Image: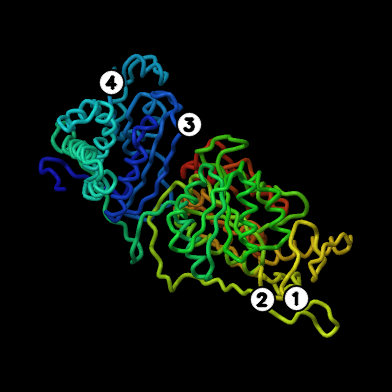
Amino acid sequence: MSTAIEKQVENLDEATVRFCGDSGDGMQLAGTQFTNTSALAGNDVATFPDFPAEIRAPRGTKAGVSGFQIHFSSQDIYTPGDTVDALVAMNPAALITNLPDLRQGGILIVNTDNFDKKGLEQAGYESNPLEGGDLEEKFKVHQMDMTKLTRQAVDGLGLSVKEADRCKNFFAMGLVFWLYDRSLEPTLRFIDAKFGKKPEIAQANVAALKAGYHYGDTVEGWNTQYLVAKAKLPAGKYRNMMGNQALAWGLVAAAKLSHKRLFLGAYPITPASDILHELAKHKHFDVLTFQAEDEIAAVTSTIGAAFAGEMAVTASSGPGIALKGEGLGLAVITELPMICINVQRGGPSTGLPTKTEQSDLLQVMFGRNGECPMPVIAASSPSDCFDAIQEAWRIAVEYMTPVFFLTDGYIANGSEPWRIPEVSDLPRVRVKHPEPMPDSNDEGAPKFMPYARDEKLARPWAVPGTPTLEHRIGGLEKQDLTGNVSYDPANHEHMIKTRAAKVAGIANGIPEQAVDGPDSGDLLVISWGGPYGACATAVHRAQAMGHKVSHAHLRYLNPFPKNLGELMGRFKKVLVPEINCGQLRLLLRSEYLVDAIGFNKVQGKPFAVGEIVEKIEEVLAS
């Protein structure tokens, strides 16, 4: 689209936009389309979808507000942004819940529909905030009745009033597309693909989208467009990727490169369900998906798939992981390779099911009966899910153990550009199953020892049905080497210690912990999981301010990298920001006796960069 001649154009390095409205207003769709268009325009992007758990909270209430934030830039970015530069509020409840995040002087676009007595009361306003001029003193305010304008745009297309009103998110989209000089073409193609079988709906959405765009282009009061240039990303072919999607694709890649069929046994739960949905699309890659009747069936079917020689995966969130606990103990004692994915959400119990949290670390470390250690790996960003899950599979196979894989709602639902890798560059996992062997040795004893171990203490992965490899499997303790059921006290202690030594030995097969910044100084910030982007950006800002601060982001949480203790010892202080009450800090203190300082937030929201910068300065000044 061309820029109107009479309009001013302002160049920006970056911008943050948030769409917010009632659940059902199409804010997630608006945000997704704006994200995809920005990515196609060459920007680096990071997103933060935020929506209620209720399928339909009462319309117009604060509980029903849904939002989607997009941060796009001409430079590398790691977060969806702290404050918002342009806010689109579709009703009073959306305005009152999101206005605090709009920066002073930012652009406020308000749909004036529903700013009546009922709408204002539902939002908790005692008077109409659009009257009196208070907002105009702080922000660049644009008021319009989008509902009325949308109805006018689709008039004559044969839609009901309800159907016409559903198009107002496309009007909002078109207006913001004009504001940031975005092409309509990608969204027009989306409309054609999505609504092609309903031509009247497709035409209406196109009409609303163009009406919003031309509203900005022609109406007096909209005098400035903002341009954000392309980002200088490494050469390659990119696509926009969400965390759960990247995780599913990483699983498929790992399965194909290890010449395995992929089995996922899962029971639906937010925010992990999209992994099941995505994998179900890829049956042509030998992907088997099983929606079980409950979490127990999901995990035990996965153990069965692992025993059968498949690449076996189960996925859930905190409450579902709790139900899988007994099954995971069975996976540990049978020493079978599988992956258990925990997409963390706000807890305990049902908690905040659509909000993010990092509070399942201690659950995955210790939430099983008996001495039951499991390796734990965590992804740091949506695109990192693709690589990190392949590493989880490598460890599962090489060490013959179930592996916990952690993400969170912020990573799972967020998106960013993902550089599509060359298949030849992806890591291969070599899977070795023992071949048939003589039934017995010279003394007549069975030749195959199902609990004989290699140098990594991994036992052989015998595929059922292989002649001469028959052996027992189950939850009762096994005799070392033979695998016979054993109640021998000394054997039990030996097997407990052997399984623990195997997990601890993984530290010999993972990279030493890297640090972003000098390898010694005044403060080391240690993070894991979703806070990676906020911590990395905050540390970079602190370094630019002249502080001797470095950042270490942990992918391996059990065992820790071998050099972690020595690394922490080279800094005067250690700060651990977490979206929980201090779970990693507890582990670091107990493992290394280091007086780590916690910075904790449990509000269902990710860290803002500014919060961490402020904490860094506070710790350095103390």
Q: Secondary structure at mark 3?
A: loop
Q: Is residue 596 visible?
A: yes
- Residue type, mark 1 in image: Phe
When the figure is inspected, residue 115 is found, relative to residue 257, above or below; the finding is above
In this picture, residue 81 sits left or right of residue 455: left
CA separation in Å, label 2 and label 1: 9 Å
CA separation in Å, label 4 and label 3: 35 Å
Mark closest to the chain's N terminus, 1 or 3: 3
Task: Where is residue 177? Give x, y as percent.
Answer: 24, 43
CA separation in Å, label 3 and label 2: 51 Å
Toward the viewer: 404 or 158? Answer: 158
For the residues bearing labels 2 and 1, Cβ distance under 8 angstroms? yes
Q: From the viewer's perspective, is the residue at label 1 or at label 3 nearer?
A: 1
Q: Which residue is mark 4?
A: 133
Q: From the viewer's perspective, is the residue at label 4 or at label 3 nearer?
A: 3
Mark closest to the chain's N terminus, 2 or 1: 2
Q: Which residue is mark 2?
A: 434
In this picture, residue 609 sits left or right of residue 582: left
Q: Is residue 620 visible?
A: no
- Pointer 2 local density, CA inside 10 Å: few below 14, some 14–19, many at least 20: few
Q: Which residue is mark 3?
A: 54
Q: Which residue is mark 1?
A: 448
CA separation in Å, label 4 and label 1: 83 Å
Query: Going 78% across and 52% down the picture, which residue do you hit?
Result: 370
Q: How many marks?
A: 4
The quarter of the displayed image where residue 560 is located: bottom right
Mark closest to the chain's N terminus, 4 or 3: 3
- Residue type, mark 2 in image: Pro
Task: Where is residue 220? Give x, y as percent.
Answer: 14, 31
When the figure is inspected, residue 485 is found, relative to residue 88, above or below; the finding is below
